[in-house]
Amino acid sequence: MHGIRPRQKITQADWAGYMAQRLEKARNPAIQNFFGTLLPDPETPISQVPMVALDMETTGLDERRHAIVSVGIVPFTLDRIKLAERRYWVVNPSRPLAEASIAYHHITHSEIAQAPDLEAILDELLMQLAGRLVVVHFRNIERPFLDAAVNARRGEGVLFPMIDTMSLEARLHRQTLWARFRRWLGRPPVSIRLNASRERYGLPVYQGHHALVDALATAELLQAQIATHYRPETPLKDLWC
């Protein structure tokens, strides 16, 4: 793996240099194309940024011991969700599925048996992500799992900036003076899980733990967050991480 480890924080100012560095060192054509497709400038208003919501279901929470079983993506902007361009894949994790994992994401042994390895869809996935700002709910799943999976198959990983809708909710409900006061009073923290976050904005309830549905839910949540707490002119650098 080149450069920065998956869980190391990259500051806003570092992303452009990091992407350029990775382009220079990339050997795989799909990864070269990914890093060679320019992202919007950090000063770009969020209303002008092409985005893609990404969600993955996995066999567990540790990318070193667990694997991806499904991927969903939904391209969108602040004004429009492009459902016609959505993509969904079930992939074979090449590892046994635990019963708890099946109960969580409802992907069965028979579906996995018929599914291709992530390698088969990797070029298309990277092409769909290239040049778009990826939006997730809890980047500590999508970021390390995708990086580890690509690294295992291509010998080099992929890290890139994301907008994390969970982090945006944390700014509002976990990191404020009021939130600290609630903790001091012994009250439980406000939930920033996907469905609880959507409920605060009056968004409809979707059945969770399906990668495509959760990607759509994440896209809608970001639109609501920007409309409620930010402005269309908010620069990208204020939102990505």
Image (tube, rainbow, N blue to C red):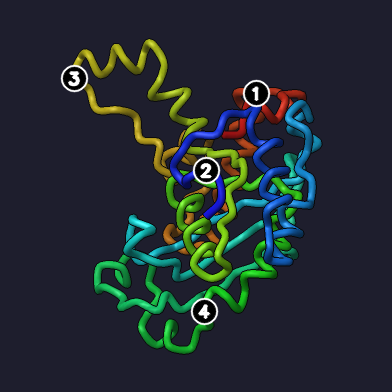
What separation in Å lies between label 1 and label 3 (alpha carbons)? 30 Å
Which of pointers 2 and 1 indicates the residue nearer the eye? 2
- Residue 24 lies, in percent from the top left, at 73, 50
What separation in Å lies between label 1 and label 4 (alpha carbons)? 40 Å
- Residue 19 lies, in percent from the top left, at 68, 44
Q: Which of disc 4 and disc 1 is earlier in sequence?
A: 4
Q: What amino acid does circle 1 point to?
A: Tyr
User: What residue did someone put label 4 on?
Assistant: 117
Q: Residues within 10 Å of mark 4 (few under 14, many from 20)?
A: some
Q: Is residue 206 above or below residue 94?
A: above
User: What residue did someone put label 1 on?
Assistant: 230
Q: Which of disc 3 and disc 1 is earlier in sequence?
A: 3
- Residue 73 lies, in percent from the top left, at 62, 60
Residue at 71% of width from left, 24% of height from top? 234
Helix, strand or loop at label 3? It is: loop
Helix, strand or loop at label 1? It is: loop
Q: Is residue 106 above or below residue 73?
A: below
What separation in Å lies between label 4 and label 2 (alpha carbons)? 26 Å
User: What residue did someone put label 3 on?
Assistant: 186
